[in-house]
Image: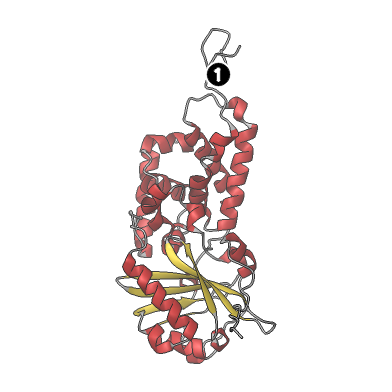
């Protein structure tokens, strides 16, 4: 028997919740993607996890009785998907987590590590559900914070994200994980202690890129495209880092970074940068000169900023996967020459 609202009535006359629509499920895709990204450290695995969540939810809609909200139900499914994906998986990291920095004079790239070794960048537009919520979620997708989360056991990771980032109540998290409030609180304490040992604390709200930061990014773009190392290093903090996944090599300090760029990285001279946003930071698609004409993809640069200086240049070289994810073009043509009047 169907009620006028579309819900069904049990034989005793008690109405159950109406069946959610596909549109109602899809409305949660953005926030679920951000949640799965923090859990997994990979934009691509996060999208796979959310797609699997939607498939499982759609197949199970007849069993959704409305005793919890649709949002909580989807988070429960997404958490189970992520925990399964993390079972037996290695910890994703940043180059700075794996090796010591190397001076440019003795630095060599070495062999690339597999894509599963690295924290991957995430487009802001995919990880933040809505503009009005952006400030609350921006800091919690920073590369350093996502990398720190990978030090946590998977269930501790879920507890910390749900409690500290998404502000769920302990009782809600306990229900989602099928455990007790005391167990949730204990897991949260252990997660906080582990994060503190990495030097990263739980995330707080962060404002969108300020005008000062935007101006700094504009100056960086100009200095990089001119390949003016004096201007570029003037923008860097004393402990700024340069990393280039999938290689474990990284270096620290303006002098070593500049020496790398004019040494091993000299072919980047003449590059063009296309602005985008990743992990709550300004970012650029870097295109190097193509001998056949124009510019071809080379790296996705995620630029970390603190206290008016650039603290990190993270150059992700997996452009075949990352540029389509960020909606960046696969080639930049030569600019059209303006025609002179006869």
Q: Along the horizontal axis of the image, is 191 left or right of 98?
A: left
Furthest toward the left, the residue is: 307
Residue at image position (37%, 68%) is 214
Q: Secondary structure at mark 1?
A: loop
Choose between 184 and 1: the one closer to the eye. Answer: 1
Between 280 and 288, the one nearer to me in the picture: 288
Q: How is the image coloured?
A: secondary structure
Quadrant assignment, res 269? bottom right
Q: Nearer the viewer, residue 35 or 319?
A: 319
Residue 291 in the image: state x and y as whole percent.
67, 85
Q: Which residue is mark 1?
A: 7
Which is more toward the observer, 282 or 137? 282
Can you tell which quarter of the image residue 53 is in? top right
Question: Mark 1: few, some, or many residues within 10 Å (few <14, many ≥20)?
Answer: some
Image position of 121 with respect to 295: above or below: above
Residue drawn where x is 36% and y is 59% of the image: 208
Q: Where is residue 340 drawn, in percent x and y?
A: 59, 84
Total count of labels? 1
Q: Quadrant of the N terminus?
A: top right
Residue 152: percent from left, percent from top: 45, 55
Question: Image point 55% across, 81% down: which residue?
Answer: 271
Snapshot quadrant of residue 195: bottom left
Please state the horizontal and vertical placement of residue 191, each as a whole percent of the image: 39, 52
Indicate left or right for 206 with 263 as reference: left
Given the current orientation, which residue lies at the most extreme right position? Answer: 292
Whether 237 is drawn above or below 18: the answer is below
Q: Looking at this view, name the residue that lies furthest to the top.
A: 12
Q: Quadrant of the C terminus?
A: bottom right
Which residue shows up at 44% across the image and 47% down it? 130
Query: Does the rendering let one see residue 178?
Result: no
Specify whether residue 228 is in view: yes
């Amino acid at each position: 028997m169907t009620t006028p609202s579309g819900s069904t009535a049990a034989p005793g006359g008690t109405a159950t919740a109406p069946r959610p629509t596909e549109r109602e499920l899809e409305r949660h895709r953005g926030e679920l993607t951000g949640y799965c990204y923090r859990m997994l450290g990979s934009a691509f695995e996060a999208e796979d996890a959310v797609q699997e969540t939607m498939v499982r939810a759609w197949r199970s809609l007849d069993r959704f009785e409305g005793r919890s909200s649709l949002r909580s139900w989807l988070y429960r499914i997404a958490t189970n998907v992520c925990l399964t994906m993390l079972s037996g998986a290695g910890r994703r990291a940043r180059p700075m987590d794996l090796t010591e920095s190397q001076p440019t004079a003795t630095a060599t790239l070495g062999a690339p590590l597999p894509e599963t070794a690295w924290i991957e960048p995430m487009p802001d537009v995919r990880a933040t559900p809505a503009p009005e919520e952006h400030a609350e979620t921006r800091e919690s997708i920073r590369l350093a914070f996502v990398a720190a989360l990978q030090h946590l056991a998977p269930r501790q990771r879920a507890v910390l994200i749900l409690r500290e980032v998404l502000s769920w109540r302990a009782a809600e998290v306990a229900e989602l994980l099928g455990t007790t409030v005391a167990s949730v609180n204990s897991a949260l304490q252990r997660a906080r202690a582990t994060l503190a040992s990495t030097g990263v604390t739980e995330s707080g709200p962060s404002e969108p890129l300020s005008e000062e930061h935007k101006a700094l990014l504009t100056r960086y773009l100009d200095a990089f495209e001119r390949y003016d190392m004096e201007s570029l290093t003037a923008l860097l903090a004393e402990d700024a880092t340069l990393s280039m996944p999938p290689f474990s090599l990284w270096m620290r300090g303006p002098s070593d970074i500049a020496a790398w760029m004019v040494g091993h990285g000299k072919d980047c001279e003449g590059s063009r940068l296309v602005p985008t946003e990743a992990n709550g930071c300004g970012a650029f698609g870097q295109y190097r000169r193509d001998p056949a004409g124009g510019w071809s993809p080379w790296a996705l640069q995620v630029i970390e900023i603190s206290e008016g200086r650039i603290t990190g240049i993270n150059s992700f070289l997996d452009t075949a996967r990352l540029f389509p994810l960020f909606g960046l073009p696969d080639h930049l043509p030569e600019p059209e020459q303006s025609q002179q009047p006869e």
